[in-house]
């Protein structure tokens, strides 16, 4: 009898000990875009700080937003795009950053910080991770065969029905994202990309409908594989995704060459921001993670791996030449001046834009 | 005493399925129904509160007063939703019919195969489930695309001169649904065909009934429970199917699953998407319940 009690006491004591150890183990739960970091960064972070990183990935802002709005995600660091971030801040999803814990903020690039203030006033809730553009990815050889041009540099290939129809047969994909495509159409028409004026939107819809017959598919991720495999010859997509397609095509070595163009008429610029949910359990660790990411050598390593530009000025001298020297990744001043940013639509505008988009996509 | 105990036990056994229904169907349905009566706000969660005792009794009634059926009216105002429902039902019905045409010979062949072979055949029907559904649908992209296996094979045979465009069309959706749901049709059909007494067919043939007439007069009527079960198992999930039309279908394909997705994720309108889901449920449940009642009555008459 007494022995079993002793045993019981011993096991419960052990249980308490192990529980204590578990409570002491520091972790940070990170939810980031897929293929968006050099994973060795996470290992090195754990080595340096003793904080274990539980890393999970998503592939659309909508999925992230739905999880955040439902609450209780269990994540400590999330990476929404600026337009989504702005609305999520309004909904009370995030906690204010404690900037005293983020000394590496001094490394950030003021050019980017100024632009992200549009979404996050005074950058109180978020830091920039990566930024990029929405432009045109294309199969160099197929486009040359169909159009007889060496490289694409204008939205004309997308928005002129007589030109895009020549590419229809080899395949054109377009992002299934009205918040990207409607502003692009407005900008091409010389209108304000952020306009929600009914007449302007009607003109954009007309333009999109005129090229609709030449679009094989509206989808926001399939074009990476389709471009890399040579299944399609053009996709309107996000810069980094198209660079991924370019790299996969090069690795596969099947004679597919993919390139990316920021059209000269202007393109949308977007920002992926790291933020901490209000109900994060490991706020302390999340701040340490953010601070680590803002270290020049760390974020330079990430950019060298994913081919996206980052918002860290001090990291620029550590970037490889094919990243910092590529005008499609780090655009020159002239192109930069032509890039535009958008704001989130309010729910009424959103409904109108989504409805417009459904008419374009399905014809209904 | 013992009899009471068995009565209680049999009651308990009946309670379990009802409990299952309550926890996994009725409660989630009521939550969705509740959300469908509220409106959107920018908050967490993104709809106006419905039932909450947090603000006291007056707050509870204030919330109750704010409930409205506006979201349901909205579904009627825009033809988009009605069209999406109709197109989903048509696509599901056509797919179910094709699945049935493909599945019946398979099930019949299995039921008539030598008894020693049947477990293996059954295994082969279930085998595809060992690979993820998503991967199998993705594999069809590789088969159906213009430079895919099917086109290469047909070109090699010389049947066609240039690749057929199948991917991103309705045809691809039908292929995807028929392929994915075929086991759900074959298994119940096989179950009812296997039980069949084949001496009945022999008797019919002895009496001079030609094989085709014997099939329609004996085999098919006896297989009807399997046909009904199989068709429902294919039709119901096919109506709300999202993955197959998203991956294989073209952008012009309007299905209710996609409409619901864009209401929920693009518009962040949880109330309207809940209303879409409730209406979808009604469209499916009402005919099925009616059908079941008719069938039950028919069975009673048979006795």
Image (spheres, grey):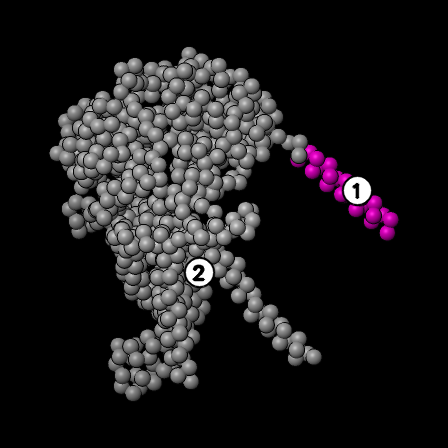
Q: Position of residue B44 (x, y in %)?
A: 47, 40
Q: Nearer the viewer, mark 2 or mark 1?
A: 1
Question: Magenta region: which residues?
Answer: A1-22
Q: Position of residue A304 (x, y in %)?
A: 41, 21
Q: Position of residue B224 (x, y in %)?
A: 36, 73
Q: Quadrant of the C terminus of chain B?
A: bottom left
| Chain to which the residue tagged by mark 1 belongs | A
- Up the image or down, A327 lies above or below B78; here it is above
Q: Is residue A11 magenta?
A: yes
Front-most of residues A313 and B129: A313
Q: Is residue B108 magenta?
A: no
The answer to whether dots 2 and 1 both sit on one chain is no
Give the residue pinned by disc 2.
Answer: B123
- Up the image or down, A36 lies above or below B114; here it is above
Residue drawn at x 52%, y 48% is B59
Indicate the secondary structure of the residue bearing disc 1.
helix
Of all residues, the one furthest to the right in this rendering is A2
Indicate the secondary structure of the residue bearing disc 2.
helix
Of all residues, the one furthest to the bottom in this rendering is B207
Give the residue pinned by disc 1.
Answer: A10
- Up the image or down, B132 lies above or below A105; here it is below
């Amino acid at each position: 009898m007494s022995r079993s009690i002793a045993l019981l006491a011993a096991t419960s004591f052990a249980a308490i000990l192990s529980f204590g150890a578990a409570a002491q183990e520091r972790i940070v739960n990170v939810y980031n875009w897929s293929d968006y970091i050099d994973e060795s960064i996470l290992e090195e972070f754990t080595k340096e700080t003793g904080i274990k990183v539980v890393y999970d990935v998503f592939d659309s802002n909508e999925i992230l937003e739905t999880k955040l709005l439902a609450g209780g995600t269990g994540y400590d660091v999330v990476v929404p795009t600026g337009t989504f971030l702005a609305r999520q801040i309004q909904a009370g999803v995030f906690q204010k950053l404690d900037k005293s814990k983020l000394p590496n903020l001094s490394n950030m690039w003021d050019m980017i910080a100024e632009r992200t203030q549009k979404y996050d006033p005074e950058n109180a809730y978020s830091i920039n991770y990566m930024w990029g553009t929405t432009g045109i990815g294309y199969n160099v050889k197929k486009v040359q065969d169909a159009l007889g041009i060496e490289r694409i540099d204008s939205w004309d290939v997308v928005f002129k029905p007589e030109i895009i129809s020549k590419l229809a047969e080899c395949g054109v994909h377009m992002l299934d994202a009205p918040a990207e495509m409607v502003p692009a159409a407005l900008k091409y028409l010389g209108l304000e990309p952020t306009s929600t004026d009914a007449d302007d939107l009607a003109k954009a819809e007309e333009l999109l409908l005129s090229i609709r017959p030449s679009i094989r598919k509206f989808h926001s991720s399939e074009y990476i594989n389709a471009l890399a495999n040579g299944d399609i010859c053009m996709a309107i997509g996000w810069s980094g995704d198209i660079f991924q397609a370019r790299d996969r095509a090069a690795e596969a070595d099947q004679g597919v060459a993919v390139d990316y163009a920021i059209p000269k008429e202007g393109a949308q610029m977007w920002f992926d921001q790291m933020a901490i949910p209000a109900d994060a359990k490991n706020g302390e660790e999340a701040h340490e993670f953010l601070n680590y990411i803002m270290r020049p050598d760390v974020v330079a390593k990430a950019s060298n791996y994913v081919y996206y530009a980052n918002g860290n000025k001090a990291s620029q001298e550590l970037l490889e030449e094919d990243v910092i020297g590529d005008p499609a990744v780090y655009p020159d001043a002239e192109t930069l001046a032509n890039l535009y940013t958008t704001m989130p639509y309010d729910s009424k505008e959103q409904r109108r834009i989504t409805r417009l988009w459904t008419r374009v996509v399905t014809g209904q | 005493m013992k009899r009471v105990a068995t009565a209680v036990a049999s009651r308990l056994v009946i309670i379990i399925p009802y409990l299952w229904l309550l926890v996994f169907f009725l409660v989630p349905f009521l939550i969705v129904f509740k959300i469908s009566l509220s409106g959107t706000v920018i908050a967490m969660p993104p709809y106006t509160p419905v039932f909450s005792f947090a603000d006291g009794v007056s707050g509870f009634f204030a919330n109750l007063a704010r409930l409205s059926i506006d979201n349901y009216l909205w579904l009627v105002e825009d033809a988009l939703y009605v069209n999406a429902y109709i197109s989903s039902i048509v696509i599901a019905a056509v797919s179910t019919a094709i699945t049935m045409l493909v599945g019946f010979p398979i099930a019949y062949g299995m039921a008539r195969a030598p008894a020693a072979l049947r477990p293996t055949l059954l295994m082969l029907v279930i085998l595809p489930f060992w690979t993820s559904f998503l991967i199998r649908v993705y594999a069809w992209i590789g088969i159906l695309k213009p430079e895919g296996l099917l086109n290469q094979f047909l070109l090699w045979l010389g049947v066609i001169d240039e690749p057929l465009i199948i991917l991103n069309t309705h045809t691809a959706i039908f292929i995807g649904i028929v392929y994915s749901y075929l086991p759900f049709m074959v298994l119940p059909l096989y179950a009812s065909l296997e039980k069949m007494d084949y001496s009945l067919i022999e008797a019919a043939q002895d009496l001079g009934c030609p094989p085709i007439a014997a099939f329609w007069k004996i085999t098919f009527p006896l297989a009807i429970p399997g046909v009904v079960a199989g068709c429902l198992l294919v039709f119901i999930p096919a109506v709300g199917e999202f993955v197959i039309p998203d991956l294989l279908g073209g952008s012009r394909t309007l299905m209710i699953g996609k409409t619901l997705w864009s209401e929920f994720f693009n518009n962040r309108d949880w109330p309207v998407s809940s209303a879409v889901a409730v209406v979808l449920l009604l469209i499916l449940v009402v005919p099925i319940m009616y059908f079941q009642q008719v069938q039950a009555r028919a069975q009673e008459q048979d006795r």
